[in-house]
């Protein structure tokens, strides 16, 4: 039973980071009805901003993290919206989706070419001190990662539901035409969505990089896990993305821990979240916590 | 005057072009290109980058000292992206130019996919791969820069029996040619020494999350854990082992104690022990001098792959000088059964002997990670002194 709890705790810590990235998919879907296939690279890149800040500017790590979040909001939020999304969205979702794939390649190869193809060590904000939780030894870092990720999402939820700007953002997501008639500055609300997505991606990057290390290829597994999480949880609901992230994180770890006990090699662990994805698409296409959307003909 | 001036200019241009055209082959013949087909991106980026830097440093030195048989060397780097298919394509293109030798690949899977090509073309291939089966596939043209697993695993098995005094053990390996080769070799060696393998744990190349693997290891009743994965995976494993408080001796072979792993895993690598075939921390003046030159040039400490890359050009230099000509077949012929000593070729760093299959024999080391560094605890002699 101790093993089970150990796997669940580790899965929740990783799943919380998937959730942060998955929320980004949800936010951009609501804002622009498009899927950002560069979301994984959006999580990969901020770690390098932090590394550059510490090595070039020589600032302490926590300041480097703030610089990374700010740089992400400027490059992956502001610039992404004005340089990529705005010019292409008027041509429909498909050109934009394809251009996000191009952005992913550009960011990945840019880091490989101008920084390094090698994995870089990345400091942890949290200590690896071991604590005893109901007989299970877990590190402060694991617990901390989970709570920081959840706190970031809780802050987002609070912002969206309890502030005037947040409610305007929700109105924009639900029906931009009506929101505009009611006097909501729709363009600005969409911009805020992109900025929030970039900030959440930067937080995810800072939390995951001590485990994955900072590497140009990190975007692929992270993007895939977050995408699966968003679909499993529900692409059109932030709470769905959170649930999806946690479910994918825990199921992946439990699969790695127990598959060989039922005679299946644990190397098939990567297939389990994908099987879940197929089952959800077949039997609950809107996701576990998603909202069913009717499409007008 | 105008027509004459114009004619003079035209004549001058024509003569210049003719002179350059004639000079070009002569210039080309003064420089020998050696293709370096290595892992510069993908999972093997760390390995390939170290090899690239080591081989570049050696070629600079060789060229500064007059080259090989009076010819300067130019390395041509091709990135395999750690993919055997791309390695094959790179080797095929390189062989079209009829080189005197090919360096790389370093990943055993890529070496395995290419060694018959160099064998058929009769071009010596200086490899970084360590899988045991590479030298058993009938190629007469591959030459190792480090021990094959058939040489290193008996040494680590002896250490597990005599040094660690392990009776039961868990084996963690990466599910690729390198890992499976090492796993098969160590299983055989452990079995012959009466050490029982209680847990046989396969992991994936590029795996990021080792939580489940460490949970299984914590539950296993073993005296030690033998870890045989690539650099980044090794570092991630060590971090997870520390995170979960895995308190069993972690033993590795070269990679687990490598400098890149120590740099990535930081204090999680403390206390790791094992066997290393090549290390910049060896108490050998030539190795120490190499380590200083490498650090001064690239601003980081070389790992064993940097040394492997460094000695590759010196292997070709020594063999070509023995053969007396820059000919691929003659160089391979010279390398077979050759002992290269640092007294005649300082760049070889440690005396090495290559047998007819390209297997290398030289001294090696037992080491431990202490204070963020690899510390040598014992030097093991050559198998055939």
Image (cartoon, coloured by chain):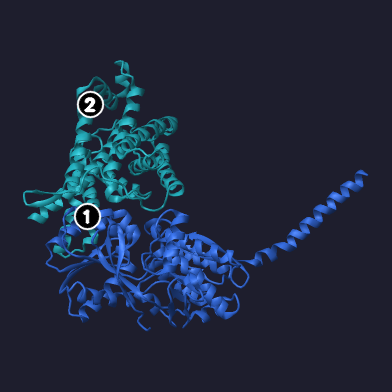
Q: Badge 2 local density, few (<14 within 10 Å), some, or many (20+)?
A: some
Which of A1 and B320 lies nearest the eye of the viewer? B320
- The quarter of the picture where residue B328 lies is bottom right
Q: Residue furthest right?
A: B1
Question: Label 1's element?
Answer: helix
Q: Is residue A126 above or below residue B16?
A: above
Given the image, what chain letter belongs to the residue carrying mark 1?
Answer: B
Q: State the residue at coordinates (29%, 63%).
A: B256
In this rendering, position of residue B177 left or right of residue A141: right
Look at discs 2 and 1 and give the one toward the viewer: 1
Q: From the top left corner, tell me how far across and down residue A136 is, in percent.
A: 9, 52
Q: Which chain is cyan?
A: A
| Disc 2: which residue | A159
Which of A280 and A250 lies nearest the eye of the viewer? A250
Which of B263 and B27 lies nearest the eye of the viewer? B263
Q: Which chain is blue?
A: B
Q: State the residue at coordinates (42%, 29%).
A: A82
- The quarter of the picture where residue B272 lies is bottom left
Q: Is residue A109 above or below residue A295?
A: below
Given the image, what chain letter belongs to the residue carrying mark 2?
Answer: A
| Disc 1: which residue | B240
Q: From the top left corner, tell me how far across and down residue B122 is, in percent.
A: 53, 77
Q: From the top left corner, tell me how far across and down residue B81 is, in percent.
A: 43, 58
Q: Badge 1 local density, few (<14 within 10 Å), some, or many (20+)?
A: many
Q: From the top left corner, tell me how far across and down residue B295 is, in percent.
A: 43, 57
Q: CA–CA distance between discs 2 and 1?
A: 35 Å
Instruction: Please say if the residues under marks 2 and 1 sit with CB atoms less than 8 Å apart.
Output: no
Q: Which mark is residue B322?
A: none
Q: State the residue at coordinates (29%, 42%).
A: A206
Question: Label 2's element?
Answer: helix
């Amino acid at each position: 039973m101790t093993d089970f709890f150990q796997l669940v705790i580790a899965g929740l810590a990783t799943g919380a980071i998937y959730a942060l990235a998955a929320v980004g998919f949800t936010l951009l879907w609501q804002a622009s009805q498009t899927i950002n296939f560069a979301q994984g690279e959006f999580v990969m890149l901020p770690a390098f901003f932090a590394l550059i800040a510490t090595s070039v500017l020589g600032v302490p790590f926590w300041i480097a993290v703030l610089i990374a979040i700010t740089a992400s909001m400027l490059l992956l939020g502001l610039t992404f919206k004005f340089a990529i999304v705005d010019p292409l969205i008027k041509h429909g979702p498909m050109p934009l989706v394809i251009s996000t794939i191009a952005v992913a390649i550009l960011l990945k190869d840019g880091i490989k070419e101008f920084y390094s193809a090698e994995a870089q060590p990345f400091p942890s904000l949290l200590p690896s001190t071991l604590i005893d939780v109901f007989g299970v030894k877990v590190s402060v870092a694991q617990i901390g990662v989970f709570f920081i990720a959840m706190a970031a999402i809780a802050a987002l939820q609070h912002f969206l539901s309890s502030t005037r700007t947040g409610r305007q953002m929700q109105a924009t997501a639900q029906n931009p035409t009506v929101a505009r008639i009611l006097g909501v500055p729709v363009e600005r609300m969409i911009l805020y969505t992109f900025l929030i997505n970039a900030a959440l991606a930067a937080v995810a990057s800072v939390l995951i990089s001590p485990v994955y290390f900072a590497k140009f290829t990190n975007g692929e597994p992270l993007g895939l896990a977050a995408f699966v999480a968003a679909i499993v949880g529900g692409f059109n609901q932030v709470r769905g993305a959170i649930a999806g992230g946690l479910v994918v994180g825990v199921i992946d770890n439990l699969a790695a821990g127990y598959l060989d006990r039922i005679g299946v090699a644990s190397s098939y662990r990567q297939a389990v979240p994908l099987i879940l994805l197929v089952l959800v698409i077949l039997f609950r296409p809107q996701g576990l916590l998603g909202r069913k959307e009717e499409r007008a003909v | 005057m105008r027509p004459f001036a114009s004619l003079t200019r035209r004549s001058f241009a024509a003569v210049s072009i003719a002179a350059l055209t004639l000079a070009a082959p002569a210039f080309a013949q003064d420089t020998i290109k050696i293709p370096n087909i290595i892992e510069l991106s993908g999972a093997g980026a760390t390995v390939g980058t170290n090899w690239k830097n080591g081989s570049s440093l050696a070629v600079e030195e060789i060229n500064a000292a007059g080259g090989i048989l009076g010819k300067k060397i130019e390395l041509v780097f091709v990135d395999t992206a750690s993919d055997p298919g791309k390695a094959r394509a790179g080797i095929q293109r390189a062989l079209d130019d009829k080189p005197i030798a090919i360096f790389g690949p370093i990943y055993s899977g890529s070496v395995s996919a290419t060694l018959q090509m160099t064998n058929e073309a009769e071009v010596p291939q200086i490899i970084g791969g360590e899988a045991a089966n590479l030298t058993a596939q009938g190629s007469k043209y591959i030459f190792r820069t480090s021990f094959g697993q058939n040489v290193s695993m008996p040494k680590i098995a002896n250490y597990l029996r005599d040094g660690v005094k392990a009776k039961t053990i868990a084996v963690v390996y990466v599910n690729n040619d390198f890992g499976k080769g090492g796993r098969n070799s160590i299983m055989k060696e452990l079995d012959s020494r009466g050490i029982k393998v209680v847990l046989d744990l396969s992991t994936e190349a590029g795996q990021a999350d080792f939580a489940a693997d460490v949970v299984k290891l914590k539950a296993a009743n073993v005296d030690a854990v033998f870890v045989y994965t690539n650099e980044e995976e090794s570092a991630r494993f060590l971090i997870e082992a520390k995170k979960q408080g895995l308190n069993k001796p972690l033993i590795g072979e070269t990679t687990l104690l490598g400098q890149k792993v120590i740099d990535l895993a930081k204090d999680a690598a403390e206390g790791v022990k094992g066997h290393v075939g090549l290390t910049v921390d060896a108490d050998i003046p030539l190795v120490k001098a190499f380590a200083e030159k490498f650090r001064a040039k690239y601003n980081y400490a070389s790992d064993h792959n940097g040394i492997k890359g460094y000695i590759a050009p010196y292997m070709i230099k020594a063999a070509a000088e023995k053969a007396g000509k820059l000919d691929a077949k003659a160089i391979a012929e010279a390398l077979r059964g050759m002992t290269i000593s640092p007294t005649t070729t300082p760049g070889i760093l440690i005396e090495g002997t290559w047998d007819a299959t390209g297997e290398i024999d030289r001294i090696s080391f037992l080491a431990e990670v202490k204070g963020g560094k690899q510390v040598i605890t014992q030097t093991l002699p050559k198998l055939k002194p």
